[in-house]
Amino acid sequence: VAPNSPRKMLTRRQRQTLLPQSPLDDPALLADTNAVMDHLFCREKLWMVPPTFLDGQPAVTEASRAMLVDVIVDISMAYKMHDETVHLATTYLDMHLACAPVRRDDLHLLGVGCLLVASKFEEVHPPEIDDLVDRFSSDTNFWDRDDLLAMEQRVLHALGFTLSFATPAAFLRRFVGAPKLGGADPLPHLAAYLCELSLLDASFVAFAPSLRAAAATCLARAATGARPAWPRALAERTR
């Protein structure tokens, strides 16, 4: 499955607002972020998707899962959602696939359902259910309002109503800051793009979210000519 083009992904980055800078650049923020970082590192150890999470899903392949992630990204772009919402929805998807069987006919609906739950958790204005049905249900993947509400309940039950997870986006925002609207610095945009590309590959669930964010940060710094590519402050921050 071909991933989204870099131009398409970077355009979405440039539409984001309310974007904090890296705490590494502001010592006054370090004390406030240390407790948050401790919490994130603790959360990621508690909730890791097993690498064999697709073994019990005869109707789901790595390719079909990648297509679902693509659906999540496309719908999130239509509503200008935040990065964290996309990462959280993908985490919900993988968690659901790890513990509950899914029919092939329900895959598209599952992706939309996971994004709906994530948007209600992360977004100020999540999409309306009727609007989702009107815009994204089709003859090929048909579902109605009742189907989407039922899938939302299935996702919540599969997650045990646990909705807060440590995602690569949560760590990345604290490693390099988030991309600024119209910002000239390419590093946050590239790091966010690399981090999102990792969502398409099911094998990346074997790596902790903090490690994926750290790898994206290091690669983005090296690609944009930042020296050193892995400074001591980042090494300490990423643990």
Image (spheres, rainbow, N blue to C red):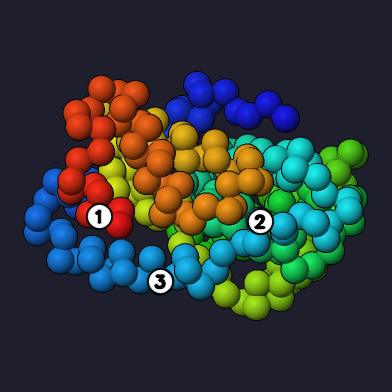
Q: CA distance from mark 3 to mark 1?
A: 14 Å
Question: Which residue is drawn at the image coordinates 14% and 46% (left, top)?
Answer: 25
Image coordinates for residue 107, horizontal then vertical, percent:
81, 51
Compared to residue 70, the image places residue 24 above or below, namely below
**Between 53 and 146, the one nearer to me in the picture:** 53
The residue tagged 1 is 237
The residue tagged 2 is 51
Instruction: Give the quadrant of residue 120.
Output: bottom right
Other-residue count near label 2 (Cα within 10 Å), few / some / many at <14 / 14–19 / ≥20: some
Label 3 or label 1, whichever comes before in sequence order: 3
Instruction: Give the quadrant of residue 186.
Output: top left
Residue type marked 3: Cys
Compared to residue 18, the image places residue 9 above or below, namely above
For the image shown, how many numbered marks are present on the structure?
Answer: 3
Quadrant position of the N terminus in the picture:
top right
Other-residue count near label 1 (Cα within 10 Å), few / some / many at <14 / 14–19 / ≥20: some
Image coordinates for residue 34, horizontal then vertical, percent:
23, 66
Whether residue 99 appears in this view of the structure is yes
Nearer the observer: mark 2 or 1; the answer is: 2
Image coordinates for residue 115, horizontal then vertical, percent:
63, 54
**Between 135 and 52, the one nearer to me in the picture:** 52
Label 2 or label 1, whichever comes before in sequence order: 2
Q: CA distance from mark 2 to mark 1?
A: 26 Å
Residue type marked 1: Arg
Q: Is 17 left or right of 47, judged from the image as shown?
A: left
Image coordinates for residue 6, horizontal then vertical, percent:
51, 24
Label 3 or label 2, whichever comes before in sequence order: 3
Whether residue 144 appears in this view of the structure is no
Question: Which residue is drawn at the image coordinates 84% and 40% (left, top)?
Answer: 138
Nearer the observer: mark 3 or 2; the answer is: 2
SS label for mark 1: helix
**Between 175 and 180, the one nearer to me in the picture:** 175
